[in-house]
């Protein structure tokens, strides 16, 4: 059951169970149930809590069942998922029973094979159609200024906005909600924008917030942030606040997109990636009390922009994204010193979180010396490299080779994450090289 907020769990489970019992009547009994709630069928079985539990049960010789009975195809499979599951089930000696074939599915039968492909395409089409209708509706509602759910931004709270605009929902007693300034945190948001407008760095703002013991978003609202630590402010948190246009009073939707096919194993949440600004839906009018004016917000975005060099040129880091600290495993930061590029690792400490006493000293490498050392090490390993820095960086990126740096030596290793090649533009990443066996 995916849309748990619009369906009754008991009713949905009951009709699926009854359908399954009718299907196996005279052949066997239902001995175990695997019922996922609030999970999209688009997710792989391994990314569904109950689906993953069923997969674990398949390898148990004492599992107590020899068939998986599904009350309705669309409740379990999407697209080509059935084809992906068949080898696993066959290896475990488990059949799949579906009401659509009135029994066990046998892919050796051409009719069954064609029916499974048809049902998979139909299930996929149903999801795509429903998603596009929902997205279009949500875009219209956002442009009208309606609050569409989710955690309120730091500095805001939810207040009652009267009866639900949908008459049917209103008759059921449902209420609409809107954002209003939170008296505990709204002043901190205004302070953050004021400091940034004065030219203070994002890390400096985070450091002052921690020194003033201002509760960070996850500490101020732990109920909605159970997946976060609440330890304190970091530069990314401050940057997120400064970039959020909802503080101007406009309702904004679709800034982020969910990747339903990929789920974070730590939180069970789908992955996210930012949408382009032209894909955002912004309300035509002010929908809630603004914490900053539009002019101030625009000025802050300009402060955030990268300042050019004195000669108007661009700082280039050939090895950005390819270097990892051998002491802590973190990606090394690009760092411009004395008019030349270099790389450093502060072992997790930033301007927002100063280095503790006794912590390892900063690791630093000049780019020119590092390139010379890479060529020497590669030659020692029988892998001659080009002579120019651009060619060396391009070769390492294309070959998936990373550089592990210590104070006096380096080591070339295969990278596990090739998504951030050294293209001369620094990108933030937490990727680490695979440790030697």
Image (tube, helix red, strand yellow):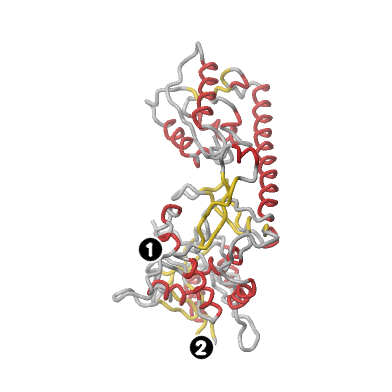
- In the displayed structure, 35 sits above or below 43; it is above
Q: Which residue is drawn at 39% across and 73% down?
A: 353
- In the displayed structure, 64 sits above or below 221; it is above
x and y percent of residue 202 in the render? Answer: 50, 74
Q: Can residue 173 be seen in this view?
A: yes
Residue reaching furthest left? 358
Left-right relation of 117 to 64: right
Secondary structure of residue under mark 1? loop
Q: Residue at x 54, y 74 (%)?
A: 193
x and y percent of residue 75 in the render? Answer: 57, 31
Q: Which residue is drawn at 50% across and 42% down?
A: 47
Image quarter where the N terminus lies is top right
Q: Is residue 387 visible?
A: no
Q: Mark 2 points at which residue?
A: 338
Residue 231, label in figure: 1
Left-right relation of 66 to 116: left
Q: Which residue is at the front of the view, 91 or 236?
A: 236
Q: Which residue is at the front of the view, 152 or 300?
A: 152
Task: Count neighbours of disc 2 (C-alpha within 10 A) and say few if under 14, some if 14 to 19, many if 20 or more.
Answer: few
Q: Which residue is at the front of the view, 416 or 303?
A: 303
């Amino acid at each position: 059951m995916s849309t748990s907020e619009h369906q009754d769990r008991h009713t949905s489970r009951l009709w699926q169970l009854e359908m399954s019992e009718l299907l196996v009547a005279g052949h066997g009994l239902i001995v175990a149930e695997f019922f996922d709630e609030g999970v999209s069928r688009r997710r792989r079985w391994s990314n569904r809590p109950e689906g993953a539990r069923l997969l674990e049960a398949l390898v148990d010789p004492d599992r107590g069942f020899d068939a998986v009975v599904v009350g309705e195809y669309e409740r379990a499979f999407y697209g080509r998922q059935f084809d992906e599951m068949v080898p696993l089930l066959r290896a475990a000696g488990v059949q799949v029973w579906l009401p659509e074939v009135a029994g066990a599915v046998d892919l050796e039968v051409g009719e069954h094979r064609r029916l499974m492909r048809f049902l998979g395409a139909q299930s996929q089409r149903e999801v795509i159609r429903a998603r596009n209708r929902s997205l279009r509706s949500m875009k219209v509602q956002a442009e009208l200024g309606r609050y569409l759910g989710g955690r309120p931004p730091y500095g805001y709270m939810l207040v009652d906005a009267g009866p639900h605009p949908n008459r049917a929902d209103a008759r059921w007693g449902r209420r609409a909600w809107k954002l209003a300034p939170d008296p505990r945190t709204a002043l901190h948001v205004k302070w953050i924008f004021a400091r940034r407008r004065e030219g203070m760095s994002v890390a400096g703002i985070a450091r002052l917030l921690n020194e003033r013991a201002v509760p960070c978003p996850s500490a101020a609202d732990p109920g909605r942030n159970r997946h976060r630590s609440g330890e304190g402010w970091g530069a990314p948190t401050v940057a997120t606040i400064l970039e959020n246009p909802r503080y101007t009073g406009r309702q904004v939707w679709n800034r982020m997109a969910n990747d339903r096919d990929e789920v974070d194993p730590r939180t069970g949440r789908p992955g996210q990636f930012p949408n382009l600004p032209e894909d955002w839906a912004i309300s035509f009018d002010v929908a809630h009390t603004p914490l900053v004016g539009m002019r101030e917000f625009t000025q802050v975005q300009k402060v955030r922009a990268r300042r050019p060099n004195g000669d108007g040129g661009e700082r280039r880091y050939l090895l950005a994204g390819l270097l990892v600290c051998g002491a802590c495993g973190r990606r090394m930061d690009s760092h411009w010193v004395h008019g030349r590029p270099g790389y450093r690792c502060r072992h997790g400490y930033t301007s927002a979180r100063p280095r503790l006493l006794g912590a390892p000293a900063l690791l630093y490498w000049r780019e020119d010396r590092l390139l010379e050392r890479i060529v020497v090490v590669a030659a020692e390993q029988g892998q001659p490299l080009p002579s120019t820095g651009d060619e060396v960086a391009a070769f390492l990126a294309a070959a998936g080779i990373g550089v592990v740096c210590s104070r006096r030596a380096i080591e070339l290793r295969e990278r596990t994450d090739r998504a951030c090649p050294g293209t001369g533009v620094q990108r933030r990443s937490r990727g680490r090289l695979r440790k030697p066996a």
